[in-house]
Image (cartoon, rainbow, N blue to C red):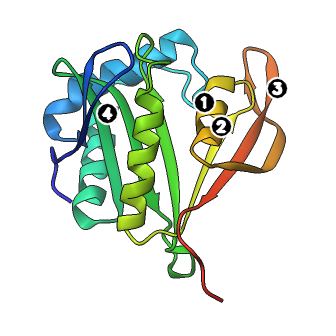
Amino acid sequence: MKTGKIIHRFTAKDGREVILRTLRWEDLDDLLELINSLIEEGADIYYDTKKTRDEEVDWLSRAIAQLEKGNALYMVAEVEGKVIASSSVTKRRFSCEDHVGNLGIIIKSGYRGVGIGTEMMKTLIDQARRMGLKILTLTVFATNKIAIHVYKKVGFKEVGRIPKAIYRNEKYIDRIIMVKEISQLKG
């Protein structure tokens, strides 16, 4: 898929216009600000130290390469010309699992609870189907109740839990594994 391709437009519940599109090089500074704002916030994500510009350049170059090869979809949400959320669906690497995609999504504080996450998830699921995927998986901190609610709302089901898999702020947190079958499997 091409970089910067608009996939969907919609109006959030708070009236803001949102564009969902594939990422592009020009998103670098916004993406760095997004991830670092979540780290500062102490959000329930796997990173806990701020990313450098060089680290973000490395990540973005790999993401764009995967996007252009068709091995992944990297999609951002843009509001008023600024990236406020990022998401991805990446195909599993081994041929025996190439019907399975891993999903991830992050949303900046101030843009949650207005339907952006739900709309992004629905769009990711639709795009994953177009990529030929049959099953989507994700993992989430057990403490991230809002995200879990959104995932369940779009049809993900908890299929497993790794007790105390995450250690953050001197406490252990379970990692929940969730799955959604998006196309009928034969066999």
- The kind of secondary structure element at disc 4 is helix
Give the mark, 1 or 3, whose residue is nearer the N terminus.
1
Quadrant in which residue 68 is drawn: bottom left
- On the image, the x and y values in percent for residue 143 come to 73, 24
- The kind of secondary structure element at disc 1 is helix
* CB atoms of marks 2 and 1 within 8 Å: yes
* CB atoms of marks 2 and 4 within 8 Å: no
Observer-side mark, 3 or 2, equals 2
Q: Residue at x 41, y 72 (%)?
A: 132
Q: Amino acid at mark 3?
A: Tyr
Q: Residue at x 25, y 66 (%)?
A: 69
Q: Residue tagged by mark 1?
A: 147
- The kind of secondary structure element at disc 2 is strand
Q: Amino acid at mark 2?
A: Val
Task: Determine the CA span between mark 1 and mark 3.
Answer: 19 Å
Q: Amino acid at mark 1?
A: Ala
Q: Residue tagged by mark 3?
A: 172
Q: Counting other residues with Cα less than 10 Å from the Cα at mark 2, is it few (<14), some (14-19), or many (20 or more)?
A: many
Q: Is residue 74 above or below residue 36?
A: below
Q: Quadrant of the C terminus?
A: bottom right
Q: Which mark is residue 140?
A: 2
Give the mark, 3 or 2, whose residue is nearer the N terminus.
2
Q: Which mark is residue 56?
A: 4
Observer-side mark, 2 or 4, equals 2
Give the mark, 2 or 1, whose residue is nearer the N terminus.
2
Q: Counting other residues with Cα less than 10 Å from the Cα at mark 4, is it few (<14), some (14-19), or many (20 or more)?
A: some
